[in-house]
Image (spheres, helix red, strand yellow):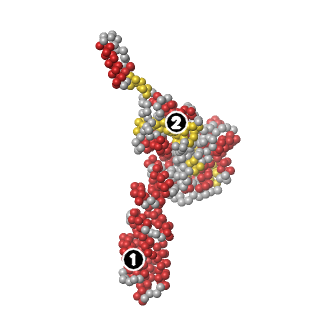
Amino acid sequence: MMIKTRCLIVLTFLSLAGFTANGQDIKTMFDEAKALMDSEQYALALGRFKQISALDEDNDLVRYAGFYQAISAYHAGDAATALQLFTQLEAKYPSWSEAANEIDFWQAKIAFESGEIENGLDHLKSIDDESFKEEIEALKVKSLAKENDRARLKVLLKSYPDPIIASRLLSSLLTENVMDRNFVLIDSLITTFKISPKANIDGIDFSPKKEVYNIGLFFPFQYAGDSVSLVRMMNDWPVRFLQGMQLGLEKLAEENIKINLMTFDTKTNATTTRAILADPKLKELDLIVGPAYPGPIGEVERFSKENKINFINPLSSNGEILINNPFAFLYYPSNESLAISAAEYARKHLTKNKNVAIFYASEADRPRAELYRRLLEKDTFNIVIDQMVRPNESVKIQQMLVQKIKVDKDPAERAKMIAEMDSLLAAGVRRWEKYTRDDFMDEKLGIRPDSIGHIFIASDIPSLSASVISGIDLREDTIYYVGSSRWLSSEQSISFQQLERVEAVFTGSNWIDYDKAAVKEFRKRYLEMFSAVPKKEDRLGDAYIGYDIMVNYGRLLSQYGKYFQLGLKTKKLVPGELTEYFNYQLSNDNRYTPILRMVDSKVKKSDN
């Protein structure tokens, strides 16, 4: 132990010094007591040291006996007595500078173990010897690891702005459900204290590196063994995804990264997938990509967690697979990350009119809609519409925006019309009823002008966004559109000029800049290999996604090893191959969601 070693150095010097006869007797007693303590007979050592410390002599051994008496009491299980003895030493020997730092350290240790964190930190603050730095940090880390009360950690950090406290608070915040996380505070902790989150995974202490990594693609190829199903399969999206991955293998091989890619046909059901995963050889996989349907996803998620194998869902934004599974990843931002990014933009830029409409397409979209609502309502926005609209009924949104209804005219105008008819009647005019019932009504928009500031589409279904944008474009007032960029690559019924005209805002969802050199290189590779232009269809898988996942995750395996998250969590942004960046620092989905706009009929990153 550090403290024992420091004191023994002093005692070695004292043993060489001359003593009086009485002093020599004290030294004999001290050596016997020290031998008892070294052999862990703390109760006996405590009694011997007490005999020496009680002597009324001006002798270094008497002082050190008091110090070791306190240590023996601690190890004998009596921390309260130890603390009392250390306090008495401070009072009795106020000028004993050689031991002051060590006494403070012991007092801090006992305070921490008693749950008196502030007291412990105060004692550590009193230590002025730099050689204690490593031991102080270790004590703080160990002691604060037991503190899970976030409110208390916030109070502690305010009084003691210490990176170790900040790191503990950060770790605690990251254990919360992503919907409840305070990402503003999280980002502030990382920036202010220059700390990085760590991937704390039970049972995983290091990330082994290999010469060749095994990646399994679990997809619904649905090959039935006949020529008809083969033709259908070769023209379907899973094969295009695989083609992209094959091109990615070529790219990685050029970088001397070796990947063994295996494909498995999960069909669309859990039973088939479960049978595939029963093969014990699959425990040698380093990464699983897929599947695409809920049943197979559940089986792979279970297999991943049980066997500590990373897997990435390449199509979904459903963050449920990330809960309590440190081996699960999403290629796209989760519903929660998309909601947080959009809400941050709205709270910063869309505050002139705080009335909001939210539309979503299914139960799968509901988490995005609910979190967006919660975040905005915290900032005094008023959610006037919160509605699920099925994709086949998406035209209802446009109708809602442009539909006109009959309402009563202004009361003053109605009164004027009635007075006019009364005057005609009084004058004996035969046809005094010059106004009909309809004349007393006006036709106005059902959603009144300026009654909504912006509309948030909490879904990647193209028809919902197309309906909203078309409806906004037909109105004379200003309603802003906010949604995800993912649907833009699908077949769409609205033009880029229309998106630019309504000033549509998108949260980037693995956005691909088609002017990027790497994208042009990929398209050239694909054309040369398959004599076709790659089709971009983000709602399903495609060659772009397969290529991007293979290259990006192949590089991560090569750089960081099988459990690449251990290194990935230390980086805020990781450059993508086709996509711009990935950010997995705070969660296992891609939280890099830049704000995008239409400029000159192209999707471009906004500076705001």
- The amino acid marked with disc number 1 is Tyr
- Indicate the amino acid at tag 2: Glu
Query: Where residue 260 sits in the image (x, y, percent)?
Result: 64, 51
Residue drawn at point x = 53 percent, y = 54 percent: 569
Residue lying at 47% horizontally and 55% vertically, measured from the top left: 189
Number of numbered discs: 2
Task: From this view, report whether residue 426 is shown above or below residue 110.
Answer: above
* Residue at screen point 44% across, 87% down: 19
Q: In the drawing, does residue 356 fall left or right of residue 498?
A: left
Q: Quadrant of residue 433?
A: top left
Is residue 335 at all visible to an observer of this figure? no
- As helix, strand or loop, the secondary structure at mark 2 comes to loop
Q: Against 323, is 142 above or below?
A: below
What x and y, as percent, mark residue 563? 56, 55
Return the mark for residue 93.
Answer: 1
Q: Which residue is mark 2?
A: 503
Q: Is residue 345 visible?
A: yes
Q: Real-space Cα distance between discs 1 and 2?
A: 75 Å
